[in-house]
Image (tube, coloured by chain):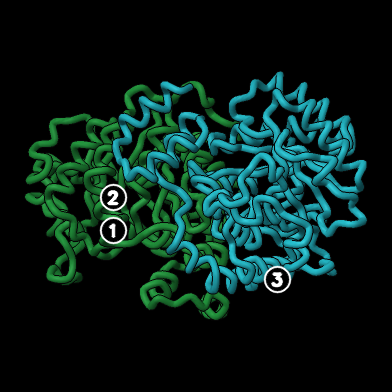
Chain colours: A green, B cyan
Amino acid sequence: MENVGNLQSFRKGVKILDATLRDGGIVNSFYFKDDFVKALYQANVAAGVDIMEFGYKVSKKMFDTTKFGKWKFCDEEDIRAIVGENKTDMLISVMSDVGRVELKEEVIPKKESVIDMYRVATYVHQVPTAIEMIEYCAKMGYKTSCNVMAISKVQESSLKQALEIIAQSPADIMVIVDSYGALYPEQIRPVCDTYLEVAAKYGKQVGIHAHNNQQLAFANTIEACAKGVNYLDGTVCGMGRGAGNAYTEALLGFLKNPKYKMEPVLKFIREYMNPLSKEVKWGYDTAYLLTGIYNVHPYAAIDFIKANREDYEQFIQEIMGVD
Amino acid sequence: MENVGNLQSFRKGVKILDATLRDGGIVNSFYFKDDFVKALYQANVAAGVDIMEFGYKVSKKMFDTTKFGKWKFCDEEDIRAIVGENKTDMLISVMSDVGRVELKEEVIPKKESVIDMYRVATYVHQVPTAIEMIEYCAKMGYKTSCNVMAISKVQESSLKQALEIIAQSPADIMVIVDSYGALYPEQIRPVCDTYLEVAAKYGKQVGIHAHNNQQLAFANTIEACAKGVNYLDGTVCGMGRGAGNAYTEALLGFLKNPKYKMEPVLKFIREYMNPLSKEVKWGYDTAYLLTGIYNVHPYAAIDFIKANREDYEQFIQEIMGVD
């Protein structure tokens, strides 16, 4: 498929989803202060961001509430304390991992909730369970997306079969997730073609969530956009697990829709992200480059960096060994 | 043009040029210690790097030798103190800016020099002068390249005319230089087509030197490679002016030629680059993102960061004003 659109125009369908609290929360165990979250919400609204993801929605029976901040759980009242009734054009999403939420106890009907969308994160072998969750959330009135993680480890034939099943579920969006930051642009483009082809057949949208292990998160995101992928995940200053994500502010600078404004996010960076970046660490590092190149989960690199290790050559042996 | 080659194979013609001393030297005024330079040289040789750029060759009449380290000048004896006769497969290059070297006094015959290649950096309006320099260096027996800087500011028609002239000079390589880190992959690809088309006509090679303002240096470099660009500039840890460059180690990880080894460069990173990165600062920053987006020289962002400024919104006004 050729580019859809060009650099001087814009496609109305393109949306930015800011996942700073959710993917960034993995860095600081979701301990964001309320003024931080409120300022981010206001910045995103002012910037024209289309969807803000507040965090994960996971079961308090499965995760210890004393070990995580509130955005790991996204209680209705905690979100409302920030957004009130959210009388804005920006949607609110939360993410749930397959099997980590008690649907009937924790997902209330949409008309009682300020949440607009549930994004269900799944590995390819869990897709049938993910679809049960998506069906439940859709029945409760929410928009839904299905985010198949770690696709750089999945054979194309399996991925196609999974996408065919997902596309026949109520999921509104199918999100390409390069969890390991392993894919090069020349690999992302055919992946986009695969997703877009299935999506077109069933009237679905496609999104992308990229990681920056090889400093390709932004490149892969805008290449996907050029192909016709409409839902673009970013995080402010790229804050996210390990090497982090595509930068929301870079996406705002790239997209030509006049509704997007960088300045509110730049103000937020000055007032909140620059100070935060002195307290907690995320973003590109040589160790993340290596897990990206070797196409493995970044947890090994996270441990390597925490341990102040620099023996990269030995690290390569270790990550090749677990594969 | 379609991709030339694929991700599972390699093209023998692809070469890595490590420009750490030259572009990185702009960060620390070329004050690298001898053990650093020697270790980098050994790492590059062991890694299979094809060309190592030692620095600039500029006139000591024009630049104060008390204000710059020796790699701003690249005296023959200083290079020889590191490499001896350079009995390796790795070539040695230096860069000269148009009008900043006294050709007849400072460029000795190749047979007396351990330098293999002169790379001439030029703005598009200086091309005829650059060609005089290239002709002189070629006559003295050196390989040469012509690096047209700041092409994101040059109209395609002017660029094509310049390339036609350069391609008829003795220059062996024409290098795409995205000085401002302003170009997106979908812009780099047609630029590559333009260069490659002219190069094919006259039997020249094409190279690329990218900057990381929008975190696209590596992406643009490997996209160019896929198009048929054979000379890829990198610097270790991306060390270079402002936001820096494509990372040599990422290129080594990407390219499949078995002669390339990452480990020697990883060892160099641990022993030399990680300590250096605590003393001097380079690499991606919000201010560089902005000069990339607004397609202006990074010097404004360098000053902005030096002054510990964070008023990005005002900075945008300033850089739009100078344009």
Mark number for residue A278?
Answer: 1
Q: Which mark is residue A302?
A: none
Residue B99 locus on image (x, y percent): 72, 33
Mark 1 and mark 2: Cα distance apart in space: 7 Å
Mark whose residue sits in front, 1 or 3: 3
Dot 2: element: helix
Label 3 neighbour load within 10 Å: few <14, some 14-19, many 20+? some
- Nearer the observer, B170 or A147: B170
Instruction: Locate residue A199, reporting x and y percent.
Output: 46, 39
Query: Badge 1 sits on which subunit?
Result: A
Residue denoted by label 3: B42
**Is the Cβ of the residue at disc 3 closer than 8 Å to that at disc 2?**
no
The picture places residue A196, in percent across and down from the top left corner, at: 51, 39
Residue that appears at 65% across and 50% down? B72
Q: Which residue is mark 2?
A: A274
Mark 1 and mark 3 residues within 8 Å of each other at the beta carbon? no
Amino acid carrying label 1: it is Lys
The N terminus of chain B: image quadrant: top right
| Residue type marked 3 | Gln
Q: Chain ID for label 3? A: B
Instruction: Check whether the beta carbons of the residues at disc 1 and disc 2 lie within 8 A of each other.
Output: yes
**Whether residue A103 is visible:** no
Question: What's the CA distance linking mark 1 and mark 3?
Answer: 35 Å
Q: Which amino acid, by three-letter code, is at mark 2? A: Asn
Q: Is residue B251 left or right of residue B199?
A: left
Q: Nearer the viewer, residue B242 or B306?
A: B306
Rendering coords of residue B39 (x, y %): 65, 71
User: Which quadrant of the structure image shows residue B310?
Assistant: top left
